[in-house]
Amino acid sequence: MGIFKDNSEVFYRSDFDKKNKADIRTLVLEKNARDKYDKKIRNRIVVVLFFCLIIGLALTLIK
């Protein structure tokens, strides 16, 4: 049973039993940092697409 799933890999409990707690904490912190960075990028993409939609609508209404 995996504890959490990343896009490329799954970490299993048996793997965690072999590592010390500091390694586990590092893995979790790295995953949280990646998730936060991915969320920032996703938000920026949404803002850019929304801005393009507004400009497209404005150009359509002007013509």
Image (tube, rainbow, N blue to C red):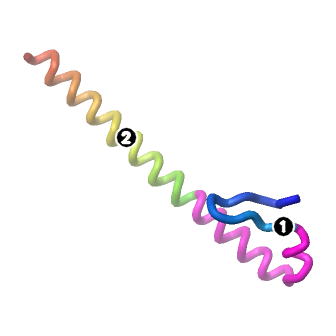
Q: Residue at x 64, y 71 (%)?
A: 30
Write down the region rendered in magenta.
13-35
Q: Please provide percent x and percent y for residue 43.
A: 45, 46
22 vs 45: above or below: below
Give, as a three-letter code, the residue at label 2.
Val
Residue bearing mark 1: 12
Residue 23, compared with residue 51, is above or below; it is: below
Residue underneath mark 2: 47
Q: Amino acid at mark 1?
A: Tyr
Q: Residue furthest left?
A: 63
Category of crowding for the residue at label 2, using alpha-carbon neighbours closer than 10 angstroms: few (below 14), some (14–19), many (at least 20): few
Q: Rounded to the nearest whole Å, what is the CA distance between mark 2 and mark 1? A: 36 Å
Residue at 52% from the left image edge and 60% from the top image edge: 37
| Residue 31 occupies quadrant | bottom right
Relative image position of residue 42 (x, y in whole percent): 47, 48
Q: Earlier in the sequence, mark 2 or mark 1?
A: 1
Is 21 part of what is drawn in magenta? yes
Q: Residue 23 placed where, x, y %?
A: 77, 81
Front residue of 8/30: it is: 8
